[in-house]
Amino acid sequence: MINEFDLFKDFLRQQKLRWTPLRKMILDIFLCFDGHVQIETLHEKICAQDPSIGIATLYRTLKLLIDCGLVEAHSFQNGKKTYERMFHVRHHDHLICTRCEETVEFEHPLIEKYQIEICESYGFTLKSHRMELLGICKNCEKSGDSAWHLSKKTLLQSSYRLKQGTLQQTTRF
Amino acid sequence: MINEFDLFKDFLRQQKLRWTPLRKMILDIFLCFDGHVQIETLHEKICAQDPSIGIATLYRTLKLLIDCGLVEAHSFQNGKKTYERMFHVRHHDHLICTRCEETVEFEHPLIEKYQIEICESYGFTLKSHRMELLGICKNCEKSGDSAWHLSKKTLLQSSYRLKQGTLQQTTRF
DNA sequence: ATTATATTGATAATCGTTATCAATATTAAA
DNA sequence: TTTAATATTGATAACGATTATCAATATAAT
């Protein structure tokens, strides 16, 4: 049964690139993680094994892993990307609380089925998908906050900082 | 019937912020666009009316529009964000070609229904969702690239450039 | 062996986005 | 109205994640 390492090796050979100890190590460490990993996290774990490894190599290797389909990159609002294993994992989607950021993974076979139908009707070949349900979890709902949930950034704008003392009153009405 | 301008005005008043001609103008221009708009596009159109307006104000105003729920930001792989109108528009999801980035909007009532069920079963209150189906559109499928679809970035890496002449052979096998 | 090519780490560059700041405009208070 | 307080704005510096560059080294092909 083919595994990630074989697939990566094949890919590299086809591209006339090289299967190096470093690339093996990075793939190895990447596969330790489930779900979405950030570069930072990977880099820390890699440095624990060998601190001499540069961040550029990590980015480069991840790009190769993406190109050969083992990994998928996702962009988030904070400007960072996360990298997700795409081989030998059961697909799942995310339910995210927008207040506390609690995340629940779920899957729903019927939704998947309709996704395929939709793609076909537009002449697309479905490769993957991302579905995020954004809501408020039970706990946060109970502790009921303001109607406008301001971003931290906005709240910290200079003009807001001046009236920091009264902020609480102005944001809940 | 309440409109975007009233809603924004209300929001600003509640936050003790000001309803200025500039903010009106930016909202006005933003609403000219359907679907996803990039900062760049907005800035061009705004500068056509008044070239003295700084990009920082545009970012700031967009953040306010996000905070009051009129706009939603999406992050894309190229590191740019797009801004999408979220009021008085029918909700839709996206079908995206990962090769040419062509985007199709669609909606599917049954999927929406299941989403609500899922949320309820986890005790979440659904506020919004994002669903992106990633695939290959008909055109790109036809022009059939290699099994490994290399990112432009990877192809332009220095080591690849050296064998540029033979690139075509090495990438399709 | 010798040559050609790929890999690596260090670090500079890039680029979208944010923060800072001084000048100006607006609102509130007197 | 005058004055004080606060918000807005534009220019531009700073930031931070990612990428490109380059010289040194490693690996493969001949």
Image (spheres, coloured by chain):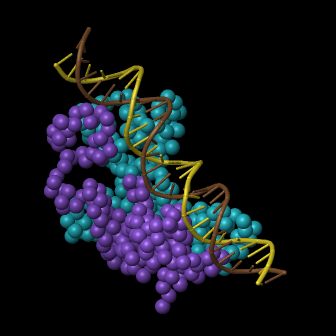
Chain colours: A cyan, B purple, C brown, D yellow
Task: Give residue A19's quadrant in the image.
Answer: top left
Q: Residue at x 63, y 80 (%)?
A: B13
Tell me the residue at 34%/60% (across/down).
Answer: A129
| Residue at the image position 27 percent from the left and 36 percent from the top | B160
Extreme bottom residue here?
A: B1
Residue B146 seen in render: yes
Left or right of residue A38: residue B149: left
Q: Judge by depth and name the residue closer to the eye, B62 or B117.
A: B62
User: Picture quarter containing residue B80?
Assistant: bottom left
**Side (left or right) of A150 relative to B158:** right
Q: Residue at x 59, y 69 (%)?
A: A150
Residue A141 in picture, x, y percent from top left: 59, 73
Q: Nearer the viewer, residue A3 or B87?
A: B87
Left or right of C27? Residue A37 is: left
Position of A149 relative to B164 (above/below) = below
State the quadrant of the C terminus of chain B: top left
- Is there any visible trace of residue A108 in the rendered image? no
**Left or right side of A89 for A164:** right
Q: Position of residue D23 (x, y in %)?
A: 41, 23
Q: Position of residue B68 (x, y in %)?
A: 54, 74
Residue A144 sits in which quadrant?
A: bottom right
Image position, residue D14 (x, y; %): 59, 48
Q: Total marks drawn?
A: 0
